[in-house]
Amino acid sequence: MQKRKSGVISKFLLITLCSASWLLAGCDRASNASAGISASKGEVSLALLDWLVIAAYLLSMLGIGFYYSRKNKNENDFFLGGGKMNPIALGLSLFASVTSSLSYIGWPGEIIKYGPVMFAGVISFPFIYFVVGWFLIPMFKKMNVTSAYEILEIKLGVSIRILATFFFLTLRFLWMATIIYVSVDIVILSLLHIDHSYGLVIGACLMLVTIVYTSLGGLKAVVLTDVVQAFILLGGAFITIIAVSIHFGSLVSWLPHSWLPQWGELKLGVDPQDRSAIGGAILMTFVWYVASSGSDQMTVQRFLASEDVKSARKTFGVSLVTGFIGMALLSLVGFAMIAYFTANPQYIAVGKTIATDADMLFPKFIVMGLPVGVSGLLVAGIIAAAMSSLSSGLNSTATVISEDIIKRFRKNDKKTVGNLNQARNLSLFVGVLTLLLSIAIPYVKGNLIDITIKVVNLFVSPLFVLFFMALFVPFATARGTFIGGIAATLIAIAVAFFGFLRIEVFFITIVSLFVGIVAGVVCSFVDHKIIGNQETAFNRV
């Protein structure tokens, strides 16, 4: 009955939003008076009806949170949705969580500036599914845990669990802070010409809505809102492609017919100093997906919320298929933006080119190239991308703080057990801290994808190094694993911010994982086999 109600609510929201957009689509976007377009300066703004669509969307998210606030009876319901959630919904939720506003805007920008090389990464998806589905998921499901990092303490001791907790919290706090910065400063303020002094206020409002429905509804609300947001994200990209096709009077004429000069030289192999190498894109995609799926609480939480191993595999499979569709659509959006703004250069900001303004072209087209109401729905889609990731980040981060810090070090405090209010308060704390951290993100240089990799991916491989040692290295010791994790972090920082060996930022996860595993294995071998450290030997079998 609960699944049926969830489905009814989801369909109702989708029908309501889509109906609103089509009713409003009759207004002519070409009218400068209603759309607020200044062709000479490329300035754009939303119409009143667009704002109403956005407001309706935000209110619907709050409604879902209030609905599910009555369904959560304990912490297990709040953090894991009772452990028997629908795998298809979980898969769509995982896709929406990973596809934040960073990638929703940044992926077309990457295609515009550097070409479609990164899309070649989808070739690795079958191998990713096999490794995660048959090597990692079964190990997670057989452990009766709420936080993935409990596994590390069981295998290697409390020091490794603490290190993993630190890695994860740092990763997710920086990730959520970057999402807020991109969504507010780069999209809402810059695109809609709102004074930047209002940035903190708007960011606080965005985070407040997310905190409310996340802290009230828990994982069930997160997953349902993610499902709605996933359809909006995919639908928004699809509508953009159709609109550009109508503009050119063809479904294919706007596609590039040759490799553009701005994309650089295309290479087939792996070159750590060149992001245009196809082999590097495939390897990077494989490493990132396996590392994040095998160590990130946000992903592992979806596996743990599934009923069994088969359901968890289905969850991951759905997320990969949806991810492929999303990447394909956003790549086509990138091509569409190149064609549209090449044909309409008057809409590019003064002093900018298609390449230098790559990250802003898709958001700008959403506002100026689509009918009233549809624009509002797609701007809501960008906000949806931000909120879906923020809600998942809030829930998973609150889970880790509760399970790996509070409960771990306050075992005798009965008030911390089964305290649903505490779980909700943690979501509030995480949201406020994230908002404050977002102030520092503008100091990181690069396009949106570069910023994401530099800020977020610093700890993806170091975190997975700890799990790799715990799950797959029989002689791993706590000291050796600790050194491996630190080594992986240091090399990631050196590549991201100090240009170590002029390695491209896209190879951060690859280099970091290699260095961390080598350091961890060598140090553990010396510690266990030569020095004779047996402290975790019995937990390794």
Image: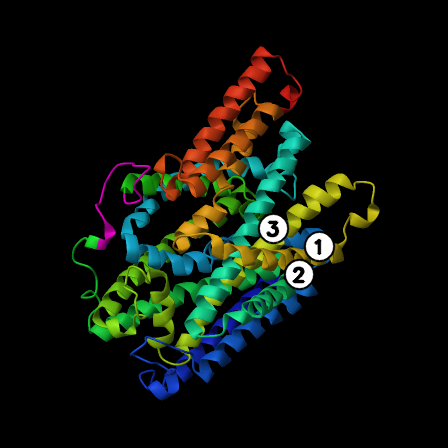
Q: According to the image, label 1 marks what residue?
A: 423
Q: Is residue 444 visible?
A: yes
Q: According to the image, label 2 marks what residue?
A: 215
- What colouring style does the render use? rainbow
| Residue 297 sits in quarter | top right
Query: In the rendered structure, are the residues bearing label 2 and label 1 in contact, judged by CB atoms less than 8 Å apart?
Result: yes
State which tag comes first along the sequence, 2 or 3: 2
Q: Is residue 253 above or below residue 461?
A: below
State which tag comes first along the sequence, 2 or 1: 2
Q: According to the image, label 3 marks what residue?
A: 396
Of the residues shown, which amino acid type is indicated by label 1?
A: Ala
Q: Residue furthest left?
A: 257
What span is in magenta? 262-276
Viewed as shown, does residue 324 lie left or right of 257? right
Which one is nearer the viewer's eye here, 246 or 118? Answer: 118
Place of residue 78 in the rendered image (x, y in percent of width and height, measured from the top left): 67, 55
Of the residues shown, which amino acid type is indicated by label 3?
A: Ser
Q: Which mark is residue 539?
A: none
Mark 1: which secondary structure? helix
Viewed as shown, does residue 80 lie left or right of 374? right
Which part of the image, by quadrant, shows the C terminus? Answer: top right
State which tag comes first along the sequence, 3 or 1: 3
Q: Is residue 273 magenta?
A: yes
Place of residue 337 in the rendered image (x, y in percent of width and height, measured from the top left): 29, 65
